[in-house]
Amino acid sequence: MSRFFVFIFSFFSFSFLNAQNLNIGAQFPMNKIENLEQSSNLKIIVFTPSLYKTNTYASMMTTSLNYYFVKNLAFTSQNLPKIDVIYIVNEDDKWSKEPNKIFTFNESSNQNKLDGTKVIYDESGKIYNAIGLKPFKQNSVSTIIPTNNFSNNVLVESSVLFLVDQNNKILMRDNDYRAQGEHLKPLEKLVKRVLKIDEIKINFTKNNTLKVGDKAPDFILNGPNYKTNSTEKFLDDKSTFKVLTFYPAAFSGQILPDFTSIDTKAAMTCAAQIQLIDHNPLLKDVKSYAISSSTNPLLEVWKSALRTNNIMYLNDENYTISLMYNSYNRLGYNNRATYVIDKNGIIVYANPDLTFEDEAKFPVILEKIILNSK
């Protein structure tokens, strides 16, 4: 598809969407959604093309929203919020036609986590049209990619997500929602700000720029594998190399696969980033840490979902470590960054803007670092 037609399609889609009164500050027409009970709770409403296996990001999207906002694992407050998560699906319920409808990580084809949410199937697009959104099936141009499950190309358009307050006022609209950490964390940040709970105050002026040869900043190790009042420091262990990898968010990355094998051609995602490091054969010679701003319970289930064996998950709740290591993004998440620190606490590899190509080459880079040290 030429760039010209992509531009024309995007322009008219953007113009059409903006023509509707569904922007931030407007009232969301909740009364136009049939079979939806009135609620005084905060609401996350997701208009999605599909929750079936042909939608490659559906399982990560439903899983992340479930653990963050239905089970409330993103919050540490004792006064947990009540948040309604609602999916309006522009398709029929194809899962109901499957012989085994199992919503667990162990079922490879259906990993959707929908317990505690409201799912409304709107195959004809009646609700979409009623509120002023164009149904996905009516789009003249579609984004298509091949998947491992199907030989044909399939529709993978981004979902449209709204955050709506207790009075149905639109607080956020995201036209490109696929459970990316870069989108999930700003949503979490806004929810906490609106509810006035667990807000993180960041004293951000600039990140600390680090380069090869610098002394690595030290910090207290905090995460699901450490005691609450742990005093263990990152640089205390001087017996081995250490790998620090920063990523935007737990349960992000568009795809939540079964992780029985490593796909080196997969798109750069938080899950793929962690998996590649965890399966690195050189891990016997290093200690590897994955860092995000999260909660320990959320990191526990994230670890369980990824089925990692070697990597340690660190919780950088207020982004203190991220600011030390030049990975904090002022929008409220970690940029992808990786550092290698030697036995003396000196940085021997620094990449504050990691790409998937960089990550794929990382095992070779790490091998050279270790061999050159002997």
Image (cartoon, rainbow, N blue to C red):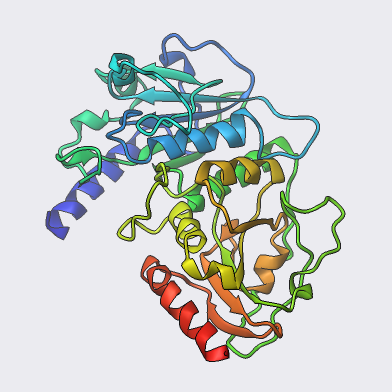
In which image quadrant can residue 334 be found? bottom right
Tell me: 343 left or right of 168: right
Please say if 216 is above or below 156. Answer: below
Q: Is residue 54 left or right of residue 291?
A: left
Residue 239 point in image, percent of width and height? 71, 78
Question: Can residue 122 be seen in this snapshot?
Answer: yes
Q: Quick check: 203 above or below 364?
A: above
Instruction: Note whether residue 171 is visible.
Output: no
Instruction: Describe residue 293's horizontal placement relative to residue 370 as left or right.
Output: right
Front one among 226 and 85: 226
Q: Position of residue 54 (x, y in %)?
A: 27, 34
x 47%, y 79%: residue: 367
* Residue 321 position within the rendered picture, expressed as x and y whole percent measured from the top left: 70, 67
Point out the image quarter for the C terminus.
bottom right
Residue appearing at x 62%, y 81% in the figure: 209
In this view, the residue in front, 36 or 107, is 107
Query: Foreground residue, 148 or 64?
Result: 148
Q: Position of residue 303 (x, y in %)?
A: 58, 46
